[in-house]
Amino acid sequence: RKEVEQDPGPFNVPEGATVAFNCTYSNSASQSFFWYRQDCRKEPKLLMSVYSSGNEDGRFTAQLNRASQYISLLIRDSKLSDSATYLCVVRVAGRRALTFGSGTRLQVQP
Amino acid sequence: DVKVTQSSRYLVKRTGEKVFLECVQDMDHENMFWYRQDPGLGLRLIYFSYDVKMKEKGDIPEGYSVSREKKERFSLILESASTNQTSMYLCASSLWIDRVILTGELFFGEGSRLTVL
């Protein structure tokens, strides 16, 4: 079983739609959580951290549910430029490196 | 801006060849990482280094070795390339580990796409 699981998609949504991605993690010792964005043929880049209380950054909202061991990312008012793969990332206690999910692909259509 | 530079964007090698992938970062970061990325499997950690000459195995180190003789440079070596090592290889760097814990901020290079025939 993968440590971090994501629905690969693709999620095809029209501009202006609201879309949500979920990610589940299996290791209860996971301490820190993040979302990365990866454009086609580009390197991954940090999008935002995920805090226990939930956090927002403009049109993006991230939430963490430790009891159910899942993380979510909500994108409101989708733009064409939001088209990318969104990677769920976890840091497990005691490990120096981050563990990445395989990503969810989003395609926003005009 | 942090710059992580990988020496080759595209390589084609033959089975059994020795392959060197070079990565250089210009921000004096302590930590450097090598990941490979494959469809459906995501990014998997091969090796990382937290200091010069220090290294730790990641999740899939078999068939790979690394070298970090200078702080800014981290090399991935495939001693005898095989077809199942055809992949996208991503190098990353970060500041001290506490910052990674807090911010999750890894800086990636553009990747090296290796094809082994």
Image (tube, coloured by chain):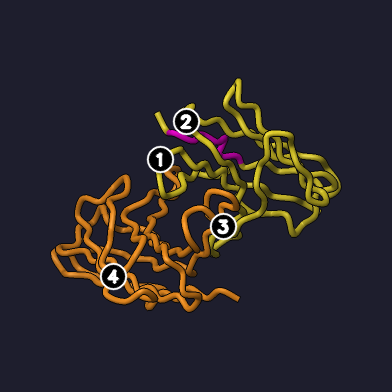
Residue B52, image x, y percentages:
31, 69
Q: Chain of mark 2?
A: A
**The residue tagged with tag 1: helix, strand or loop?**
loop
Question: Disc 1 residue type?
Answer: Gly
Chain assigned yellow: A
Residue A28 in the magenta stretch? The answer is no
Q: Earlier in the sequence, mark 3 or mark 4?
A: 4
Query: Can you identify the residue that label 2 sits on?
Result: A29
Farthest-out residue, top:
A67
Q: Which residue is mark 4?
A: B68
- Residue A6 location in percent, x, y? 55, 36
Q: Do tag 2 and tag 1 residues touch (Cβ < 8 Å)?
A: yes
Tell me the SS state at disc 3: loop
Residue kind at label 3, given as amino acid type? Glu
Q: Residue at x 83, y 42 (%)?
A: A17
Which residue bears the numbered disc 3?
Answer: B105
**Which color has been applied to chain B in this rendered view?**
orange
**Chain at tag 4:** B
- Along the line of sight, the residue nearer the viewer: A16 or A89: A89
Give yes or no for contact between labels 3 and 2 (Cβ–Cβ under 8 Å).
no
Labels 2 and 4 touching (C-beta < 8 A): no
Q: Residue B15's spot in the image, x, y percent?
A: 17, 63
* Mark 2 or mark 1: whose residue is earlier in sequence: 2
Marks 3/4 in contact by CB < 8 Å: the verdict is: no
* Residue B83 percent across, percent down from the top left: 23, 56
Q: Identify the disc placed on residue B91.
A: none
Q: Which residue is painted at 80% across and 46% down in the image?
A: A14
- Local secondary structure at mark 2: loop
| Callout 3: chain | B
Task: Say yes or no: labels 3 and 2 on the same chain.
Answer: no
